[in-house]
Amino acid sequence: MTTIEYRAPGRCPVCGHALQVSRLSCSHCDTKVEGEFAPCRFCQLPEEYRFFAEVFIRCRGNIKSVERELGISYPTVRNRLEGLIEALGFRSERSPQEAREYRNEVLSALERGEITAAEATRRLKEGKPGQRRGPEGQTE
């Protein structure tokens, strides 16, 4: 019998808040453990951040390698890394140079038609890529 492995959702599909892990089971002996367990920080990440984290680790943190593998610019790699750091619940302060690079990246994405004007406006007002959530699921 083939077992299909699905990735457990980290967020409620109805309201978007963090899901609570309440039951674990052993596929070998069928033991079941129930309670309230803290989910892992990486499990709570949106898919785009999980994918980026995997690539970043596979490239051993070498930004040039990440650039090549994803086909994106240095400022985009830096911005995604900053987003990942903040999504994991760590504070990350951008330098003025990084803020300028991020602004230029957003405007370039708008110019290439990759995002809408509304999305570009939202990103520039927030000053960070996408909606970031801390480890407890709050929007920061």
Image (tube, rainbow, N blue to C red):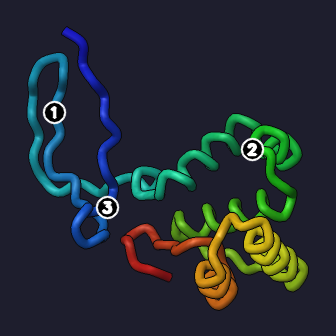
- The picture places residue 94, in percent across and down from the top left corner, at 77, 79
Picture quarter with the N terminus? top left
Report, in whole angstroms, how far the alpha carbon at label 3 lies from the one at label 1. Answer: 20 Å
- The picture places residue 136, in percent across and down from the top left corner, at 37, 71
Query: In the rendered image of this protein, does residue 46 appear above or below residue 66?
Result: below
Q: Residue at x 17, y 57 (%)?
A: 36
Occupied quadrant, residue 97: bottom right
Q: How crowded is mark 2: few (under 14 residues within 10 Å), some or many (20 or more)?
A: few
12 on left or right of 134: left
- The picture places residue 96, in percent across and down from the top left corner, at 86, 85
Q: What residue type is labelled 1?
A: Ser
Report, in whole angstroms, how far the alpha carbon at label 2 lies from the one at label 3. Answer: 26 Å
**Which is closer to the viewer, label 3 or label 1?**
3
**Which is closer to the viewer, label 2 or label 3?**
2
Determine which residue is flagged by label 3: 11
Q: How crowded is mark 3: few (under 14 residues within 10 Å), some or many (20 or more)?
A: some
Q: Which mark is residue 118?
A: none
Q: Which mark is residue 70?
A: 2
Occupied quadrant, residue 99: bottom right
First in sequence: mark 2 or mark 3?
A: 3
Q: Which amino acid does label 3 sit on?
A: Arg
24 on left or right of 111: left
Q: Is mark 2 on a helix, strand or loop?
A: helix
- Number of marks drawn: 3
Q: What residue type is labelled 2?
A: Leu
Q: Which residue is drawn at 80% across and 80% down?
A: 103
Determine which residue is flagged by label 1: 25
Report, in whole angstroms, how far the alpha carbon at label 2 lies from the one at label 1. Answer: 37 Å
Q: Residues within 10 Å of mark 1 (few under 14, many from 20)?
A: few
**Which is closer to the viewer, label 2 or label 1?**
2
First in sequence: mark 2 or mark 1?
A: 1
First in sequence: mark 3 or mark 1?
A: 3
